[in-house]
Amino acid sequence: MASMPKGASRSLRLFARGRGDKFVLALTGLETAAPGDAAALRAHLVRLQRLRDLIEESPSLVQPAVFAGVTQTRDTLIAHLCQIDELTSDVELPARASLARTFLVQKSHFLRDLVRSADALRERNPEWDDLDRRLRAELADAVYTQLAENLLMSLLADNEVAHGIKEQVAAQLVAVWENTEIDILDFCPWLESAWAARNRVRSDLGSLMGASEYVKLMREDCPEAFLDYFAADETPEDARHAFEEFLFGVSWEELCALRAALGNRGNASREWAEEVLHRTLDAEIHTGGIDPLAIHRSFVRRHRAAETRRRANLPGPRHTAEAYMMMYMLKERISGRRSYNTLLPPLR
């Protein structure tokens, strides 16, 4: 039996719910099949562990401390976070928060490289198929966690978001930054499910009405509450437009251009849309499985477009679909309604 790679046992501390076992298995296999890859991945694990240790050595965000004659607590930190804006957010964050944000990115990088190496072996050895799928699922989870944290940060720095919602967002971010093992299932399970479902759906475009994509999301277990919110009559029009962006993976402006160009053509195809938009559309699914980075690109593109509209006061959705849903559920939590408690776990 192959020996456990040096440093691999420590990876068990880096991932939640005992998930380190499958990474140890992959690295053990790579020791023989691709020793160069295994060495590079071991080194990355060591760096990740050092970063985690550095985070653990940093001052806690929830324990009271006195600095410069002022007592700092979790509540004072939340109040401080609610005052920052997008121009100073990186500078205003505590050291532990900045390191935790870096840790989320580096964990995604490690899993991305592990998937790349395992995928190369899968092409030569079908026995790696199952492990490859499991590793891709872990990469998706890491990417979704990083994106969820980015979503919360964007709401925190948005001057159009109500103060009460910002307090909820800041409290959730403190919980994420305090615990390096936390992942999206611990603080945003509905968002993980929505992204996972979207990651398994290929947008056909068709008549650009979204009926086909909507049905596919339902079949892929996209949260019913998420779908119902955007279908409700009382949902703001901008939020519904943002949901169309989510469905099709294009911006509202691009969707308007496609609809104008479609005319009496009938149905749109991805190839036709790429010609109209002069860019390649992201493929959520490819021959090797799902591509969580396609969701990452889609979210960042939609977020930046919404940010531009807000700043320039242009027509169109001012937030992403995910942000609209998050704000709605936080309003429900603040008001004391219970309908979304299963989608929003208690704050730690």
Image (tube, grey):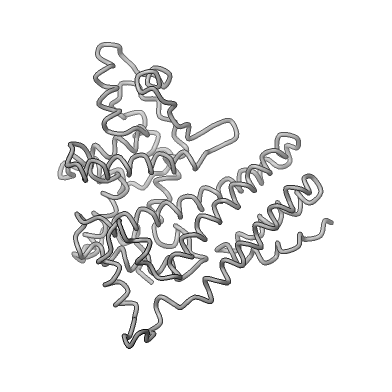
Q: Nearer the viewer, residue 77 or 210?
A: 77
Instruction: State which quarter of the image contains the N terminus.
Output: bottom right
Instruction: State which quarter of the image contains the C terminus.
Output: bottom left
Which residue appears at 30% of the width and 13% of the height?
266
Q: Compared with residue 73, is residue 325 higher up or lower down, i.e. above or below?
A: above
Question: Is residue 16 visible to the viewer in this orientation of the structure?
Answer: yes
Q: Nearer the viewer, residue 216 or 308?
A: 308
Q: Is residue 314 left or right of residue 88?
A: left
Q: Is residue 70 left or right of residue 203?
A: left
Q: Nearer the viewer, residue 284 or 6?
A: 6
Image coordinates for residue 232, horizontal then vertical, percent: 20, 43
Question: Is residue 172 visible to the viewer in this orientation of the structure?
Answer: no
Which residue appears at 31% of the width and 29% of the height?
211
Q: Compared with residue 171, is residue 190 higher up or lower down, i.e. above or below?
A: above
Residue ranking furthest to the right: 1
Residue 234 falls in image quadrant: top left
Q: Is residue 204 left or right of residue 242?
A: right
Image coordinates for residue 301, horizontal then vertical, percent: 36, 39
Image coordinates for residue 280, horizontal then vertical, percent: 44, 26
Tally of numbered tags: 0
Which residue appears at 63% of the width and 62% of the height?
47
Image coordinates for residue 159, horizontal then vertical, percent: 21, 56
